[in-house]
Image (spheres, rainbow, N blue to C red):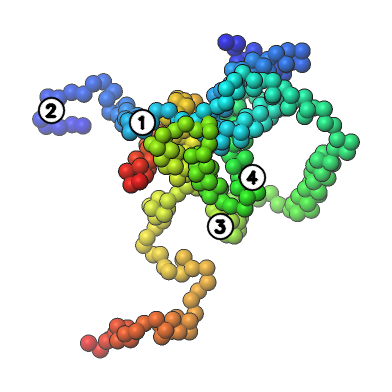
Amino acid sequence: MNKKNNIPFKTPEGYFNSFEERLMDKLSQPESSFPEESAFKVPDNYFESFNERLNNKLENESKVIPLFPIKKIIAVAASIAAIALIALGYDWNSEQELSFSDLANTDIEAYFENNDFELSPYEIAEVLPVTNTEFSDFLNAPIESDNLLDYLNENVSDFDELNFYDNE
Amino acid sequence: MIEEETLVLDLKTKSKQAQAFEVLVNTYKERLYWQIRSIVLNHDDADDVLQNTFIKVYKNIDGFKGDSKLFSWMYRIATNEALNFIKQRAKIQGVSDTNYQDRLVENLEADVYFEGDEIQLQLQKAIATLPEKQKLVFNMKYFQELKYEEISEILNTSVGGLKASYHLAVKKLEQYLKED
């Protein structure tokens, strides 16, 4: 930064370059109020005897050879069915590559519903544009005006609150 | 300690497989156990998942391409096995994953293999409230003392992202413990 009056202070070499990293390190330091041990214990000689038990399990697994490997048959049948389906459904003449716009909205919604993104409402709000957002953006079905009037009739006690005086 | 590349090569060679597998199990069983235990909490479940993890490793060693370290590859398998175990158990009991994990923490008080005092129990309850990723990062960093670089390779997340996750987790835990 060019300044008219030079500041007589200096920083160590590379100070600002490594600042973020050091800050993150400091932020992620464990708190002293947490206990250091997790308190989980294992039975006596658990690890010493683990290999033997694992070997027994492995031997048992390899001994069981099914007469009809049904999983393999299902897998092969499923692969054939999948290939046939893809072949039938594929548009062989199309050379266009798939893009984001080819995704159906329902697919995108299903993806968001079925996958946990671990985002809090605040984090989501940070990326959502607030301007030009309508109530209808959040509703699955539009509100019919009759329903709206019914709701107001039933729930608003002081009807005068709703009067707007355009002629004032 | 035997070199990782040699170990992988031996695991893929029929004549040396059994001996190499024993070395592999001896080298990693404790570390993988604690990773699994931090997720499933109960010792018997952790033992089941650990055995299944090694069986999976044994059966899939030919598929190990060496793109990542053997250690991170096995850690990933162990983590996925443990998380799937939780999901399956929750499904069998007809509850959500979160509810199932709440039950696990509640059961800790009666667990003979949990010798925690009140603070340790509270910390486990607090950890159970964290989102899955933050829970993993906190356990791996705080209790297992893994390096960020190692966690980064296991969870396939940047070191910066992990530090942020860890920081968030610590703040949430502090908040929980203060309120409680």
Circle 4 residue: B88
Classify residue A89 by image quadrant: bottom right
The spot of residue B22 in percent (x, y) is: 67, 16
> CA separation, marks 3 and 2?
55 Å
Q: Pointer 4: residues within 10 angstroms few (<14), some, or many (20+)?
A: few
Circle 3 or circle 4, nearest the eye? 4
- For this rendering, which residue is in front, B24 or A166? B24
The amino acid marked with disc number 1 is: Pro
Q: Pointer 2: residues within 10 angstroms few (<14), some, or many (20+)?
A: few
Co-location on one chain, circles 3 and 4: no
Which residue is at 40% across, 37% downward? B118
Kindly give the residue lying farthest to the top in the view shown.
B1
Chain letter of the residue beneath label 2 in the structure image = A
Classify residue A156 by image quadrant: bottom left
> CA separation, marks 1 and 4?
33 Å
Q: Which disc is residue A109 wearing?
A: 3
Circle 4 sits in a helix, a strand or a loop, which is it? helix
The amino acid marked with disc number 3 is: Glu
Circle 4 or circle 2, nearest the eye? 4
Q: Are the residues at dot 1 and dot 2 in contact (C-beta closer than 8 Å)?
A: no
The spot of residue B61 in percent (x, y) is: 69, 24
Circle 2 residue: A7
User: On the picture, is A53 further left or further right than A30?
Assistant: right
- For this rendering, which residue is in front, B155 or B136? B136
Chain letter of the residue beneath label 3 in the structure image = A
Circle 3 sits in a helix, a strand or a loop, which is it? helix
Kindly give the residue lying farthest to the left in the view shown.
A5
Q: Are the residues at dot 4 and dot 2 in contact (C-beta closer than 8 Å)?
A: no
Q: Which disc is residue A30 wearing?
A: 1
Which residue is at 35% across, 42% downward? B177
> Which mark is first along the chain, 3 or 1?
1
The spot of residue B168 in percent (x, y) is: 38, 40
